């Protein structure tokens, strides 16, 4: 049987297969880390439809001795401050740490009940946050009602509701959702009057997929409410004025420091950013290990096959030809690894990637990772190729087992 023309890949060497597997895993780790970075950046900076930098939030208000002053009183106090454009009240805040959720379903599809975030909003909620329906209409003044603490009494039959586009698509697909009905409690119907393109969810939302609905319900108790202040002045100065004014008006109450929606958003995305950088560090560590194995493995292979390489030189192969041949086989090793990585990514990556990263997927991730892998593999092949160039043709004549 004629000898193989390969230098590295033609050997029955288990290490070669392990190197290919290491390269494939490294590419998948790169794709995962890149998706995590894109998702974390989108979570922190992508447009959401809310004026994050112009809205301050008073996240909680704890009255003293159970004597709640009422949310209307707090709203009047806040509206009296200079640089305040509008004040709204809601049951929770985007990017906040408390989340209200409920199962919703359309028609008789009780088995498929997605869990959606529920915003209870007063008349100024949408305008204060800068939200507007892209389909349908806003709530009419007569449709608002007060929250009494009993969720079953929140809704007349059917009560109006605004849906996020994500929830509308999940419930009705491509059909027009305006005018359709859905249920949020057994026997309680909602009627869709409009669709909002996107509504940022609390950081602790059960499903961070944008599924939310807004109901025209006023939070009457200050202890149950979150207060939103849309302003035109300096954020920090206004936050100090709000804190001092509320403390003077309600001296016995415990009041949280006002915080901007931008700060809440940055804090909410910190976990995703930590996950992304952890993935990047793991990817870099894996690649340092892999490149080290490629360099050391190539060094060991060239050292163990010096006689064979010298024999090839004696039969007319130049040192440059052998070095180029070795580099070509390293490149072929990278190609095999890239094909394996595509298969691994197609089968495993969709199951490993969290739901909040799904939108960050890009068809260019693996092709770019393939090119980068090829460049790094060629860089790792530099030292073994340099060793091959230094092997002289007369080395074979010094071996007692070889006779020319």
Image (tube, rainbow, N blue to C red):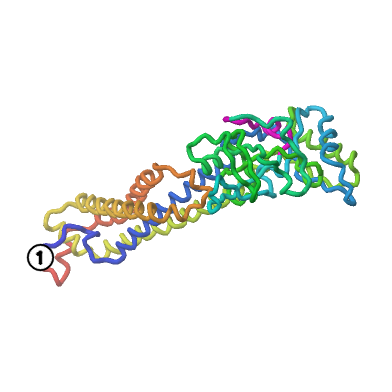
For the residue pair 120 and 401, the one nearer the viewer reads as: 120
Say whether residue 175 is left or right of residue 220: left
Question: Which quadrant of the rendered structure holds the N terminus?
Answer: bottom left
Q: Pick the quarter of the image with the C terminus.
A: bottom left
- Residue 51, placed above or below residue 61: above
Residue 295 within the magenta-colored segment of the rendering:
no
Image coordinates of residue 259 in percent, x first then y, are 73, 41
Residue 288's place in the image compared with 249, above or below, is below
Residue 211 place in picture, x, y as percent: 58, 44
The image position of residue 110, as x and y in percent, is 56, 52
Q: Secondary structure at mark 1?
A: loop
Q: Which residue corresponds to mark 1?
A: 1
Residue at x 46%, y 54% (from the top left corner): 283
Toward which corner of the image does residue 287 lie, by quadrant?
bottom left
Residue at position x 25%, y 51% in the image: 328
| In front of the other: 394 or 201 | 201
Establish if 254 lies above or below 137: below
Highlighted magenta segment, given as a residue range:
121-135
Q: Is residue 273 visible?
A: no
Q: Residues within 10 Å of mark 1 (few under 14, many from 20)?
A: few
């Amino acid at each position: 049987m004629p000898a193989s023309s390969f230098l590295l890949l033609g050997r029955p060497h288990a290490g070669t297969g392990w190197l290919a597997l290491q390269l494939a895993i490294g590419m998948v780790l790169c794709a995962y880390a890149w998706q995590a970075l894109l998702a974390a950046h989108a979570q922190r900076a992508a447009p959401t439809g809310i004026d994050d930098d112009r809205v301050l939030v008073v996240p909680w208000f704890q009255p003293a001795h159970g004597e709640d002053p009422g949310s209307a009183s707090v709203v009047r106090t806040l509206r009296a401050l200079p640089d305040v454009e509008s004040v709204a009240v809601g049951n929770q805040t985007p990017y906040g740490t408390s989340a209200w959720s409920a199962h919703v379903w359309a028609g008789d599809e009780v088995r498929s009940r997605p869990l959606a975030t529920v915003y209870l909003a007063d008349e100024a909620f949408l305008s204060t946050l800068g939200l507007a329906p892209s389909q349908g209409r806003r709530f009419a003044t007569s449709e608002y009602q007060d929250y009494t603490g009993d969720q079953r009494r929140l809704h007349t039959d059917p009560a109006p509701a605004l849906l996020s586009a994500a929830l509308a698509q999940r419930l009705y697909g491509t059909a027009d959702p305006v005018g359709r009905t859905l249920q949020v409690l057994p026997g309680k119907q909602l009627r869709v009057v409009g669709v909002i393109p996107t509504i940022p969810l609390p950081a602790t939302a059960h499903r961070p997929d944008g599924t939310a609905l807004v109901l025209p319900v006023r939070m009457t108790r200050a202890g149950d409410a979150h207060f939103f202040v849309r302003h035109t002045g300096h954020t920090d100065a206004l936050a100090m004025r709000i804190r001092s004014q509320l403390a003077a008006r309600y001296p016995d109450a415990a009041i949280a420091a006002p915080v901007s929606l931008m700060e809440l958003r940055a804090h909410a995305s910190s976990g995703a950013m930590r996950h992304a950088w952890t993935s990047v560090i793991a990817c870099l560590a894996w690649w340092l290990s892999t490149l080290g194995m490629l360099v050391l493995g190539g060094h060991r292979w060239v050292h163990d096959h010096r006689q064979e390489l010298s024999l090839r030189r004696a039969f007319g192969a130049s040192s440059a030809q052998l070095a180029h041949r070795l580099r070509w086989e390293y490149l072929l090793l990278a190609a095999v690894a890239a094909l394996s990585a595509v298969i691994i990514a197609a089968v495993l990556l969709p199951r490993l990637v969290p739901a909040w990263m799904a939108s960050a997927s890009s068809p260019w991730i693996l092709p770019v990772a393939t090119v980068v892998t090829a460049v790094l593999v060629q860089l790792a092949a530099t030292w073994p190729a340099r060793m091959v160039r230094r092997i002289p043709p007369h080395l074979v004549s010094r071996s007692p087992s070889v006779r020319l």
